[in-house]
Image: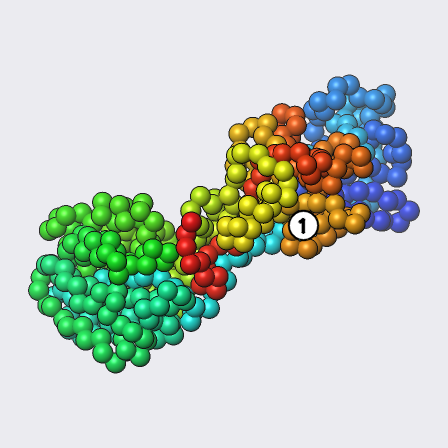
């Protein structure tokens, strides 16, 4: 069933409402002659009417003389013996159609997706190992091209050894075996890497990606890796011979389950064949790249770095909004009660968080999943000088999203607000005495390239 879209049209002295389904005229309803609470709906296909229309779920027709309305600007109402499809005036008709819909034009602007993962390339702070194919299939010239690409990726980033907004990088080459050429502590700056990195081509037959992943994983387990930085592996491959070595999938999954990201770059040269295994190794479609179509750039890799650099601290839940990273922020449910002022203090003490802000229904549904059903929990809304405000200082406006429970806000109940599943699947806001104790949710901005987190806890 396809819902009809209503438009109002005027012809001569008759005003009527034309109903359209997928851009095709499908019926008329609510003509000027119908002023009652109930009006007949036409279910015609544009030329003829149905001989036996369906009743609505409301029951019997409220009228004794039914009418069919034909779909022409010059047509007149025609009485029929059979009963029409009745609807209340506030309702729209429904019909079926096989015509293809045009591109939809939303009547309401959708809520914009928040993006709290801001990123300046110079501020990226990751620990990265590049795994570069140095096999016979890569060729010497291809290897030099791959290393130039990799170093160009890093050229616009800040490399160093500080605990701050700098990245550490290491290099591993692989063919029949994997060899660590530089570890994470090798380069003191971006210039140091550009001027002194000297990667040599192996040229042996073999593509032991599994050994390279294992070597990188082991290297991350040393003191060279900063605990607060995300671990990233970038695989640049020109070939893969299945069956010659251990399947790299298991090693890749283990690394990703431990919180690491894997980016893959399929570097196809003349007569090169696609490498399907790379898509299974990558941390999703946003982390796999290829030069197959000639549009691969270094910025693509840095964009993936930005995503990998956006994450939530320990014990915080990401609000992803359909992305792989927490674009909508990070949320820590605290399942032990506190008065509101101390709940807010606890939030501030960890990553300078605030009590949660609820901007839309999707966010409200997300927050409701953080606790068992029927749990009351403080949110950040509070009555200050007669105006409800959020912890970031924004005031609750009349056109903002609101989900007050029936009978609330209650002027005699209190100044703080909690959220509660008060009936079935219905959640609502309740204002309450700030001295009462409830569970609560802390909200903070994710760690990202532009928001450095010195610790994950």
Horizontally, is 280 left or right of 12 in the view? left
415 in relation to 394, above or below: above
Q: Residues within 10 Å of mark 1 (few under 14, many from 20)?
A: some
Q: Residue at x 23, y 62 (%)?
A: 131
Q: Is residue 300 visible?
A: no
Count of numbered labels shown in the rendering: 1
Quadrant of residue 226 within the rendered picture: bottom left
- Between 125 and 95, the residue placed more toward the observer is 125
Q: Residue at x 58, y 47 (%)?
A: 345
Name of the residue lying farthest toward the top? 60
Task: Label 1, secondary structure: give it.
Answer: loop
Q: In this figure, which colouring scheme has been used for the structure?
A: rainbow
Q: Position of residue 44 (x, y in %)?
A: 71, 35
Q: In the image, what residue occupies the spot 76% across and 34% down?
A: 413
Seen in the image, is 241 located left or right of residue 380? left
- Name the residue at 15% across, 72% down: 200
Which residue is labeled 1 in the image?
390
Residue 323 versus residue 387: which sits nearer the camera? Answer: 387
Residue 412: where, in percent of width, then height?
80, 34
Q: Nearer the viewer, residue 443 or 349?
A: 349
* Residue furthest right as drawn: 13
Q: Quadrant of residue 437?
A: top right
């Amino acid at each position: 069933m396809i819902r009809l879209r209503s438009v109002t049209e005027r012809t001569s002295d008759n005003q009527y409402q034309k109903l359209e389904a997928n851009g095709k005229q499908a019926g008329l309803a609510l003509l000027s002659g119908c002023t009652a609470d109930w009006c007949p709906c036409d279910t015609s296909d544009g030329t003829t009417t149905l001989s036996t229309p369906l009743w609505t779920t409301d029951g019997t027709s409220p009228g004794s003389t039914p009418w069919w309305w034909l779909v022409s600007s010059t047509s007149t109402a025609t009485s029929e013996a059979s009963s029409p499809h009745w609807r209340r005036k506030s309702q729209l008709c429904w019909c079926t159609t096989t015509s293809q819909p045009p591109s939809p034009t939303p009547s309401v602007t959708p809520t914009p997706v928040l993006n709290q993962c801001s990123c300046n390339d110079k501020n990226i702070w990751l620990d990265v190992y590049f795994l570069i194919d140095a096999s016979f299939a890569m060729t010497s010239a291809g290897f030099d091209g791959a290393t130039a690409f990799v170093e160009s990726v890093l050229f616009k980033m800040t490399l160093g050894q500080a605990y701050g907004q700098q990245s550490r990088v290491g290099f591993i080459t692989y063919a029949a075996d994997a060899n660590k050429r530089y570890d994470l502590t090798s380069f003191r700056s971006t210039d140091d890497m550009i001027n002194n990195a000297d990667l040599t081509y192996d040229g042996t037959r073999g593509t032991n990606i599994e050994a390279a992943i294992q070597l990188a994983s082991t290297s991350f387990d040393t003191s060279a890796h900063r605990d607060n930085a995300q671990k990233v592996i970038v695989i640049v491959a020109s070939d893969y011979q299945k069956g010659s070595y251990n399947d790299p999938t298991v090693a890749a999954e283990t690394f990703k389950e431990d919180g690491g990201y894997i980016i893959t770059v399929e570097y196809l040269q003349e007569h090169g064949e696609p490498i399907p295994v790379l898509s299974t190794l990558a941390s999703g479609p946003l982390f796999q790249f290829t030069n197959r179509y000639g549009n691969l750039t270094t910025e693509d890799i840095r964009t993936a770095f930005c995503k990998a650099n956006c994450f939530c601290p320990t014990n915080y839940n990401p609000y992803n909004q359909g992305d792989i990273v927490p674009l909508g922020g990070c949320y820590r449910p605290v399942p032990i009660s506190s008065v509101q002022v101390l709940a807010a203090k606890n939030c501030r003490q960890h990553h300078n968080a605030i009590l949660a802000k609820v901007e839309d229904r999707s966010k409200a549904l997300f927050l409701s999943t953080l606790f068992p059903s029927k749990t009351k929990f403080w949110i950040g809304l509070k009555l200050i000088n007669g105006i409800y405000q959020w912890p970031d200082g924004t005031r609750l406006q009349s056109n903002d999203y609101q989900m007050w429970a029936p009978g609330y806000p209650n002027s005699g109940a209190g100044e703080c607000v909690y959220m509660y599943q008060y009936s079935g699947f219905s959640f609502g806001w309740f204002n309450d005495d700030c001295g009462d104790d409830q569970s609560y949710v802390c909200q903070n901005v994710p760690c990202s390239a532009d928001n450095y987190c010195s610790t994950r806890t």
